[in-house]
Amino acid sequence: MRALLAEDDPRIAAAVRSALEGAGFAVDVARDGEAAWFAGDTEPYDAIILDLGLPKIDGLEVLRRWREGGLRTPVLVLTARGAWTERVAGIDAGADDYLPKPFQMDELVARLRALIRRSVGEAAPVLKAGPVALDPRRMEVTALGRPVALSPLEFRLLAYLMHHRGRVATQIELTEHLYAQDVERDSNAIEVAVGRLRRKLGVGLIETRRGFGYIIPEGE
């Protein structure tokens, strides 16, 4: 899963990015409104964290531009403590949730996960497909009841396919959602990661649709 963090305070940005990467996200950081607007408009993200107090273009205007342009990615807005008017304005502009500063990092990550679940129609916090269960909160995966140790890329890959169960994901789509923008992308990395993931899970969960991509069927 891939997230955009739009935050101009370098200390907050570094702390949030670290927390999100520790929770299994690939993260891109935008330091001002122009960069945030461009990234959100041109790159595919599973969720966006948007500080309203951005330089160049304020976060509220960035959010309005995204929504007017048809962007449907869930957006979690960060606001100053007690600024209820900002929260109302952010929700009216299309925010899916808000979090006042200062905030607890665990709450931010939990809210982001909830937004992603709602965006794909998934209610349960633990994802299940056949004999495989993935717990994003604990970063744990089990197959047939046994724990499975995955690399960060394999975890993101499985999480993405389970969030989008029943839909074929192309290699290009997976590459775009599993890597941050500043990470070098190998053309066959997804194919290799799928092969490793299948071996580790030891069950026939992920199917290949030749010429199209990979899918975890809805009935699994």
Image (spheres, rainbow, N blue to C red):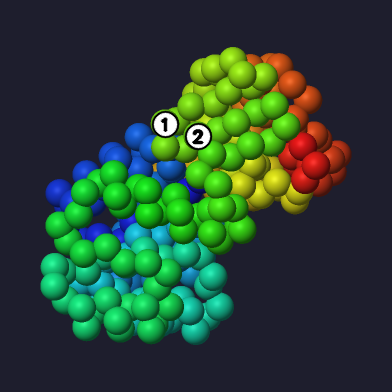
Q: Marks 2 and 1, Cα distance to the nearest angstrom?
A: 6 Å
Q: Which mark is residue 138?
A: 1
The location of residue 111, given as percent across then percent down, is 38, 54
Labels 2 & 1 near each other (Cβ < 8 A): yes
Q: Is residue 90 visible?
A: yes
Nearest to the observer: residue 96 or residue 19: 96
Assess disc 2: are there few (<14), some (14-19) or many (≥20) residues with their C-alpha within 10 Å of its C-alpha. some
- In this view of the protein, which residue sits in the foreground, 6 or 159? 159
**Residue 118 at what x, y percent from top left?**
54, 59
Out of 191 and 99, give the one closest to the viewer: 99
Rendered view: 81 above or below 67: above
Q: In the rendered view, tell whether residue 59 sits above or below residue 99.
A: below
State left or right for residue 211 relative to residue 57.
right
Residue found at x 35% / y 60%? 49
Q: Amino acid at mark 2?
A: Asp
Residue 219, percent across and down? Answer: 80, 42
Q: Amino acid at mark 1?
A: Arg
Based on the displayed image, in which of its 4 quarters is residue 127 positioned?
Answer: top right
* Residue 157 visible to an observer of this rendering: no
- Residue marked by disc 2: 135
Q: Residue at x 16, y 69 (%)?
A: 80
Label 1, residues with CA under 10 Å away: few <14, some 14-19, many ≥20: few
- Callout 2: SS: strand
Residue 59 on image: x %, y %: 29, 74
Helix, strand, or loop for circle 1? Answer: loop
Hey, which quadrant is residue 77 in on the image? Answer: bottom left
Horizontally, residue 58 falls left or right of residue 39, namely left
- Seen in the picture, residue 203 relative to 79 is either above or below; the reply is above
* Quarter the C terminus occupies: top right
The residue that appears at 37% across and 48% down in the rendered structure is 110
- Residue 175, by quadrant, is top right
The tag on residue 44 is: none
